[in-house]
Image (cartoon, rainbow, N blue to C red):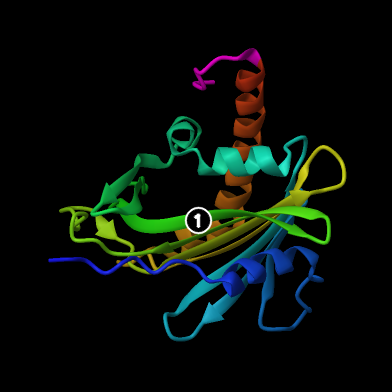
Amino acid sequence: MELPELEGFSEEQFQAAWLELGQPAPAAGGAWQLLVESMGIRIYRLYDEQSGLYEYKIFGGLVDCSPELCANVYMDLDYRKQWDSYVKELCEETHDGQTVIYWEVKYPFPLSNRDYVYIRERRDVDVDGRKICVILAKSTSVPQCPEKSGIIRVKSYKQSVAIESDGKAGSQVYMYYYDNPGGMIPSWLVNWAAKSGVPNFLKDMQKACLNYCRKTKDGSSDLSG
């Protein structure tokens, strides 16, 4: 049976992501609420009545990491397995000409791990001289990646990232994130992930960028640290 092609991303979706980089902060008292601001990172959340979950917008910066470097590190799945301690399994697979990513995330005991099957696309755009890297991702489904026993499949996942220069040696980063992890997730874990997990991820990514750049300069293909 011939499978339908996976639906990709529209020009409007890419534009919506990079436009966020130039937007003023969401107004106080508006639908988007400031959840935390620390270490130059601002995290906002919006309650979704239909799912009872939150959507997130993150604005921050990565010092001494160019947009091109940030995007390359973010797209490098093999390297991410080395610096992201929450990755259990991560790989790109091609099924009937369709390229998808399989990602299993470690959850703290006694919670079950979650896994994702998703597509993503990167575009480098020039907006009136501004060089912006945009990466979009969303969940999908292919019969060759069935659900696994003991792991909860995340069936609703969306992410967009836009990165541009901060005018110095670093980058400004915008990230939108939503997923429905399924099952019963304790509120303390949701709050930790939003308030601490995201800033920690960006710090880890900054360190990964600097190590990646160092290894590249050394001419070594070993990116293990």
The quarter of the image holding the C terminus is top right
Give the residue displayed 52% in from the left and 62% down from the top: 159
The quarter of the image holding the N terminus is bottom left
140 sits left or right of 173 in the view: left
Give the residue displayed 31% in from the left and 66% down from the top: 5
- Please provide percent x and percent y for residue 135: 57, 55
Amino acid type indicated by mark 1: Glu
Tell me where the magenta segment starts and ends, as one range. 218-225
| 6 w.r.t. 72: above or below | below
Question: Disc 1 designates what residue?
Answer: 121
- Please provide percent x and percent y for residue 140: 34, 64
Give the residue displayed 83% in from the left and 55% down from the top: 129
Q: Is residue 205 visible?
A: yes
- Residue 222 is inside the magenta segment: yes
Along the line of sight, which residue is nearer the eye, 86 or 217? 217
- Residue 80 is inside the magenta segment: no
- Please provide percent x and percent y for residue 194: 56, 59
90 sits left or right of 189 in the view: left
